[in-house]
Amino acid sequence: MENSKSEINKADKRLSLDELYRSPEFWEEYIRTELFNLVQDYMDEHRLTRTALAEQLGVTKGYLSQVLNGDSDHRLSKLVSIAIQIGKAPYIYFRDLDQVIESANRGESIFLNFEDRESTENKDTPKRVQKME
């Protein structure tokens, strides 16, 4: 009886914002959700079924379902490959965790909107491309 009581107490515990944003599970779920949304948008835009998209990506329908359902961890190389194949550049951007939490505590969004960022940069600053030598 004591064991189930401690399990209930653990289940009732709510995480603080600080604890939530410091948990790897939060960020993993965020990435899974972003990937799901990108793939779903691509499927909708191109009127593809999961089977048709799986064929296009060169993966099984079961694997694609795992990706879309967030059922398991996937290799970074496979996630990058899927992003590229649906026409998306897979950026990874790291921010100081304490600054993210401070932003959240001020009621600001902790998520970056790269589209807004790109449109602002395109208006304000000329792009420079360095030649690789």
Image: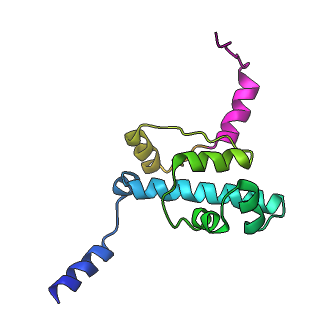
Q: Of 74 and 41, which appears nearest the observer?
A: 74
Q: Nearer the viewer, residue 99 or 84?
A: 84
Residue 120 rendering spot, x and y as whole percentages:
71, 32
In the rendered view, would you say 45 is above or below 97? below
Whether 119 is among the magenta residues is: yes
Q: Is residue 18 above or below residue 71?
A: above
Quadrant of residue 3 within the rendered picture = bottom left
Residue 70 location in percent, x, y?
54, 65
Left/right of residue 131 with respect to residue 29 in the rendered view: right
Q: Quadrant of the C terminus?
A: top right
Image quadrant where one finds the N terminus: bottom left
- Say which residue appears at 25% left-offset and 79% top-offset: 7
Indicate the quadrant where residue 59 lies. Answer: bottom right
Q: Is residue 114 above or below residue 7?
A: above
At x 62%, y 42%, the residue is 90
Which segment did they paint magenta? Answer: 113-133
**Residue lying at 59% horizontally and 62% vertically, measured from the top left:** 67
Left or right placement of residue 88 versus residue 70 in this view: right
